[in-house]
Image (tube, grey):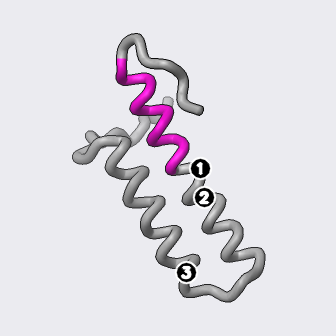
Amino acid sequence: MKRRNRFKQTTTLAYRLIQLEEAARARASHLPPGSERERLLKKAREAERAVQIEEWLATPGAEPPP
């Protein structure tokens, strides 16, 4: 049976998602309008939304994000 390679994350999920969002937006800002730029901006929006959901899940009794 094949064993999984496991490693411990040294940063939080929220921090990694924020880094992903910032990097995607920075790369998109240097591109001309087109499909690649839109793909990066979509990735940034998804990461931002994931941070909101992660924060919502971590807060007991909080209302769902808009």
The quadrant the C terminus occupies is top right
Q: Is label 2 in contact with label 1 (beta carbons under 8 Å)?
A: yes
> Where residue 48 appears, x then y in whole percent?
50, 49
Q: Which residues are magenta?
A: 48-59
| Total labels drawn | 3
Count neighbours of disc 2 (C-alpha within 10 A) and say few if under 14, some if 14 to 19, many if 20 or more.
Answer: some
Assign a secondary structure to mark 1: helix
Assign a secondary structure to mark 2: helix
Amino acid on which the number 2 mark rests in the picture? Lys
Amino acid on which the number 3 mark rests in the picture? Ser
The image shows residue 2, relative to residue 18, as above or below, that is above
- Res 32 quadrant in image: bottom right
Dominant secondary structure of the residues highlighted in magenta in the image = helix
Residue 42 part of the magenta-drawn span: no
Mark 2 to mark 1 CA distance (whole Å): 5 Å
Question: What residue is pinned by disc 2?
Answer: 43
Q: Looking at the picture, tell me which residue is in the foreground, 32 or 12.
A: 32
Disc 1 or 3, which lies upstream in sequence?
A: 3
- Is 5 on the left or on the right of 33, as rendered? left
Mark 2 to mark 3 CA distance (whole Å): 13 Å
Amino acid on which the number 1 mark rests in the picture? Glu
